[in-house]
Amino acid sequence: MFKKILIANRGEIACRVIETARGMGIATVAVYSDADKGARHVRMADEAVRIGPAASRESYLRGDVIIQAAKDTGAEAIHPGYGFLSENEDFAAACARAGIVFIGPTPEAIDAMGLKDKAKEIMQKAGVPVVPGYMGEKQDAATLKKEAAKVGYPVLIKAVAGGGGKGMRLVEDEQNFEEMLASCKREAASSFSNDHVMIEKYITKPRHVEVQVFGDAHGNAVYLHERDCSLQRRHQKVVEEAPAPGLPDAVRKKLGEAAVKAVKAIKYKNAGTIEFIMDSKTHEFYFMEMNTRLQVEHPVTEAITGLDLVEWQLRVAAGEKLPLAQEEIPCDGHAFEVRLYAEDPANNFLPQVGEISCFLHPHQARVDTGVEEGDEVSIHYDPMIAKIIVHGEDRAEAAAAMQEALSETVLTGIVTNQEFLANIFAQKDFIKGDVDTGFIARHEKDLLPAGYGVADEGDLMQAAMLLAYPDGAEDDVWNFGDNWRLNGPFAKSFTFVNRGVHKTVTVSDDVDAPGTDDSTIVEDGNNITIFRGGRVVHLHHFVPGAAGEEAYSEGRIIAPMPGKIITVMVGKGDAVKKDQPLLVMEAMKMEMTIRAGCAGVVEELPVAAGQQVTDGALLVAIEEKAA
Ligand code: MV4
């Protein structure tokens, strides 16, 4: 076994790999960018090496710098995690040339699975089911259209180099074929510098079912059962589970055996995932692609098998045989994983940045995370903050455990998708196991209801009580400390800003203090967050006249995060209506429209197109006037 390894990654996966290595007595070397100096993965590792500035391109993607760091520290092997260099065949080859073991497959295997059409051809030859379609060399419109007709509409045009849902066009009938083909090729050329496409029969209402596989250098290959990752939003996975719900054992066995065929066909070694698309009605499944890395969602497989996949990776990379034979691999109960993202579902899932002021983990769940209280979530990397994983005897028990975990989790300082996740686990269709890739879009109204994140009277009162009775001495009206209670009954008003709206509540001595329910309330300066039964309500205590407070009023619009002003649509002195677009800014590669919070006249406009703005900077001040 290795004595020391380097982890060429950051965040939760770097921490995850370090934990297993430590348990096996292997020393660990972390690498970090300037943005991650002092990050949790750096704190956990035995040693850490700076590899460059914050931008991934200049740090976590610098294979040469990382290999040098491994040489300098005497690390014998590199674990790439997922993302970054994990599926880069040049990096895997460079490791080998430097005499360092790449903890993953060979460069040839990574390369063979890199293009969709080549991968599909290999799998078809190996007897793995593939979606009917055309994956030939001929790329002229006439040939492709003829092939599409043979396949039968609707068809999908897919860029062979595509990924993440990019370079894909659904064509319902032949009228639109040429136009869709041209647009798909344009997107593929600009995104992947490769405009080759293939044609596939379109599978309606599909499920994303993937099989965890492992191969070793001795020709052994096994499957560690399947995961269902159908719950996605814009090709980003949100919930994963194992095993896939509602599948007969015969189908599960066929899936596993097809995946092992695929592994053997390419003599694959180390951890991999064979992704299938499955018809949700017939359970017919087809090879989609192979991911030649350990995946984000591997913990659900660990939960049902009781195995440590990182330990298997290290053993296989060190030349050992697979620890278990196929029939020895357990499959117990059911597991779920949710991805907690720093994003605001109520604001088009806009990524959020900031300091995590409080992070309390649920009691009965596994939490894989790269952050702790006091850590910063920055604009530079993926907004996933943590994965929450639960296990139960069966799916219903696991789902109940996740509901519990999501109601117990406390994370403040940044807005997350926590309540959105809790809403998924409250859906009847989800509990029934009725999942497919259209689930989130179909249930959008229930997952993101009109009142999402909106405080109710109880929330406001709870927050007001916290402020009125900071020591919880609500029964002793003489304990207030100041002079609220003179001769009449005690009463004090508090104003909160909740989702941009001001709300005032009055606490009086005939109001009972909440606090007997199972909610958690966190006070962080003037920000108060209430967690109750999966709901998450953010309140800002508004103190008129206090420094900076006016920034939160409807008339004073501040930058929600650092970014760049793209367009300014209004001028000083203009009359504006409530919700009228005022300017467009770009932050984290996304454009957002900033709108008027109230009707009035533009009084201040300290920004111009092209300007960078910092988080919290004043963008527009409106003198409030009735419309
Ligand atoms: C498909 C498909 C339907 N029919 N192929 C999307 C990304 C890429 N991994 C494959 N994708 C799809 N391929 C055929 N022939 C539907 C999708 C698809 C999808 C697949 C998995 C998870 C989420 C998805 C969301 C939309 C479309």
Image (cartoon, grey):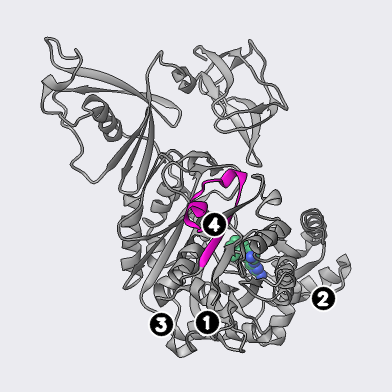
User: Within 10 angstroms of label 1, few (less than 14), some, or many (20 or more) residues?
Assistant: many
Q: Earlier in the sequence, mark 2 or mark 3?
A: 2
Distance from disc 4 to disc 2, alpha carbons, whole Å, reads 50 Å
For mark 2, does the 10 Å Cα neighbourhood hold few (<14), some (14 to 19), or many (20 or more) residues? some
Residue 37: in magenta span: yes
Instruction: Provide the residue designation for mark 2.
Output: 136
Can the viewer see residue 158? no
- 186 or 466, which lies in front? 466
> What SS does tag 2 mark?
loop
Q: What residue is shown with label 1?
A: 223
Q: In this view of the protein, can residue 593 be seen by the observer?
A: yes
The type of residue carrying mark 4 is Glu
The x, y position of residue 253, in whole percent, is 50, 85
Task: Tell me which amino acid carries mark 2.
Answer: Gly
Residue segment shown in magenta: 27-47
Who's the residue at 44% across and 66% down the image? 434
Return the residue at label 3: 330
CA gap between label 2 and label 1 equals 30 Å
> Disc 1, disc 3: CB below 8 Å?
no
Residue 292 occupies which quadrant of the picture?
A: bottom right
Q: Quadrant of the N terminus?
A: bottom right
Q: Is mark 2 within 8 Å of ligand 1?
A: no
Q: Which of the numbered marks, if any, corresponds to residue 202?
A: none
Q: CA distance from mark 1 to mark 3?
A: 11 Å
